[in-house]
């Protein structure tokens, strides 16, 4: 029967056609990763474009500040020289000289503009403005020297930059008042004003050039950001549709078949061949097992769960009991071995050995209650499960062990005296997966300590921990 089912299953497996969940999963993962990488690249591009936009704005602000600084410094020089030629107060001359040769705001402004990598056009305008301002500075220094000569200051009273100014013979010949008048005319006449207008015009042209460059750069950045946003919307839309397709396929290929399979299992019916390839394969395999189960159920039901020698439940019943008692019921599991049973067989023969096993079974049946489970689970191995009992009731169990030993020590029946090594383990959660292991450890402990004894796993652990 098993061979036939295997061949049938293999034959049907070859004919299975359907979409594989594994293949779809790999495909969807790869496609999603690709689009996520695209989106990540776009986000990085947008971040770079945004940084560029901010840099352009900051550069424009700095350039605007530099141009304004040059204009302010030029106007400041004009203001101080005019105040000096009118008031002849030396503090204005000192302020003028300090601005021209110490503070040097005009030169610093042009240097900052050069370092900011602006266009050549904007730099040229600002350079022209500085050159014209320097031309005015020569006129202004000449006017300062005229005022000093008019006031009769000695050459040592002038700063070096003024001391080196040489007046023309005609200006030297002028009277003091005429020299003052000439100095005032130099910084107030139309030619001076025209130069100031040219300086302001160059500065305005520089600002216009900077504004134009900034706007162009901003437009490029904004256009690039718009393009990136459009691509991002497209990729996100594709991912959205991929997710919808994925959900639909999950529902059709996985959720729906699972729901139908669960109902079939609850109703103990064969499964329909549907869904993805894996579910079809699962359904075929389940149906084969289902058919095999139906065929073998009658045979399994006929199998005796009783040991023919002792009349106790056998190993199959013991294993079945492990699954039945999976609940919160409290119980204790006993595992028992007949000590030196091999020597009994060797000395008295297997017939006497069988009688000894029957005597052990009789002792167990007499000592345990009718609702307890007493079983022979191996050659000379016995087991008992006592339910609804806790470690606090261990004294009653010890009485059972005592009565069993007393019964086995009676040799009036002509059978050899035997003893038992007994290990036990308590549980308040039913027959747990590790209960057998714990009881077996207790049994092994008894055997290691001379046999013919009784030990509870929990008591062993408590004694070892002290």
Image (cartoon, helix red, strand yellow):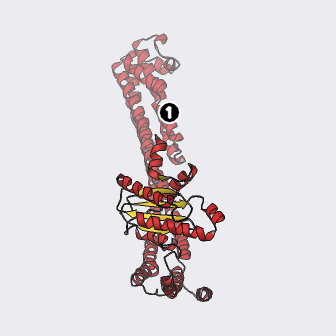
Question: Residue 393's x, y, as percent?
Answer: 35, 54
Question: Residue 105's x, y, as percent?
Answer: 45, 31
Q: Describe residue 106's horizontal placement relative to residue 391 as left or right.
A: right
The reply to whether residue 239 is in sight is: yes
Question: Residue 122's x, y, as percent?
Answer: 49, 46
Q: Is mark 1 on a helix, strand or loop?
A: helix
189 w.r.t. 326: above or below: above
How many circles with numbers are drawn on the protein?
1
Mark 1, other Cα within 10 Å: few <14 / some 14–19 / many ≥20: some
- Nearer to us in this view, 87 or 202: 202
Q: Describe residue 242's horizontal placement relative to residue 16 as left or right.
A: left
- Nearer to us in this view, 286 or 91: 286
98 w.r.t. 290: above or below: above
The reply to whether residue 220 is in sight is: no
Question: Residue 384's x, y, as percent?
Answer: 45, 64
- Nearer to us in this view, 184 or 453: 453
Residue found farthest to the right: 346
247 w.r.t. 194: above or below: below
**Image quadrant for the N terminus?**
bottom right
Residue assigned mark 1: 107
Q: Image point 47% across, 62% down: which residue?
A: 433
Q: Describe residue 108's horizontal placement relative to residue 175 as left or right.
A: right
- Nearer to us in this view, 233 or 336: 336
């Amino acid at each position: 029967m098993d061979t036939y089912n295997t061949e049938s299953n293999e034959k049907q497996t070859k004919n299975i056609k359907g979409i594989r969940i594994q293949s779809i999963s790999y495909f969807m993962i790869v496609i999603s990763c690709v689009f996520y990488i695209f989106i990540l690249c776009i986000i990085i591009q947008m971040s770079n474009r945004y940084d560029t936009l901010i840099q352009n704005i900051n550069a424009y602000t700095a350039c605007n500040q530099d141009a304004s600084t040059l204009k302010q410094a030029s106007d400041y020089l004009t203001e101080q020289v005019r105040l000096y030629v009118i008031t002849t107060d030396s503090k204005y001359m000192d302020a003028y000289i300090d601005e021209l040769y110490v503070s040097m705001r005009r030169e610093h402004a042009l240097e900052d503009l050069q370092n900011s990598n602006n266009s050549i056009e904007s730099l040229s305008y600002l350079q022209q403005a500085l050159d014209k301002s320097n031309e005015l500075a020569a006129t202004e220094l000449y006017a300062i020297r005229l005022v000093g000569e008019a006031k009769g200051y000695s050459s040592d009273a002038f700063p070096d930059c003024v001391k080196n100014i040489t007046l023309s013979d005609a200006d030297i010949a002028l009277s003091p008042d005429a020299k003052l008048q000439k100095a005032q005319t130099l910084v107030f006449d139309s030619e001076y004003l025209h130069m100031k207008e040219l300086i302001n015009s160059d500065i305005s042209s520089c600002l216009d050039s900077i504004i134009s460059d900034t706007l162009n750069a901003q437009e490029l950045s904004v256009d690039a950001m718009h393009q990136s946003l459009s691509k991002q919307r497209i990729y996100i839309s594709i991912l959205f549709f991929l997710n919808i397709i994925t959900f639909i396929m999950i529902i059709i290929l996985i959720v729906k078949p699972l729901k139908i399979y669960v109902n079939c299992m609850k109703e103990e019916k064969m499964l329909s061949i549907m869904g993805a390839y894996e579910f079809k394969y699962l359904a075929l395999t389940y149906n084969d097992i289902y058919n095999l189960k139906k065929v073998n159920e009658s045979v399994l039901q006929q199998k005796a769960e009783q040991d023919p020698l002792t009349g106790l439940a056998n190993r199959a019943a013991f294993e079945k009991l492990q699954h039945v008692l999976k609940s919160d019921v409290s119980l204790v599991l006993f595992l028992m071995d007949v000590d030196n049973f091999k020597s009994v067989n060797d000395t008295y023969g297997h017939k006497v050995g069988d009688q000894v096993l029957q005597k052990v079974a009789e002792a167990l049946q007499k000592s345990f209650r009718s609702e307890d489970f007493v079983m022979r689970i191996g050659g000379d191995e016995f087991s008992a499960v006592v339910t609804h009992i806790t470690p606090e009731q261990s004294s009653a169990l010890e009485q059972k062990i005592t009565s069993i030993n007393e019964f086995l020590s009676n040799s009036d029946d002509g059978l050899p005296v035997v003893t038992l090594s007994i290990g036990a383990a308590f549980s308040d959660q039913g027959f747990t997966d590790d209960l057998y292991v714990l009881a077996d450890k207790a049994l092994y402990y008894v055997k290691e300590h001379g046999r013919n004894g009784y030990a509870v796993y929990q008591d062993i652990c408590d004694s070892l921990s002290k």
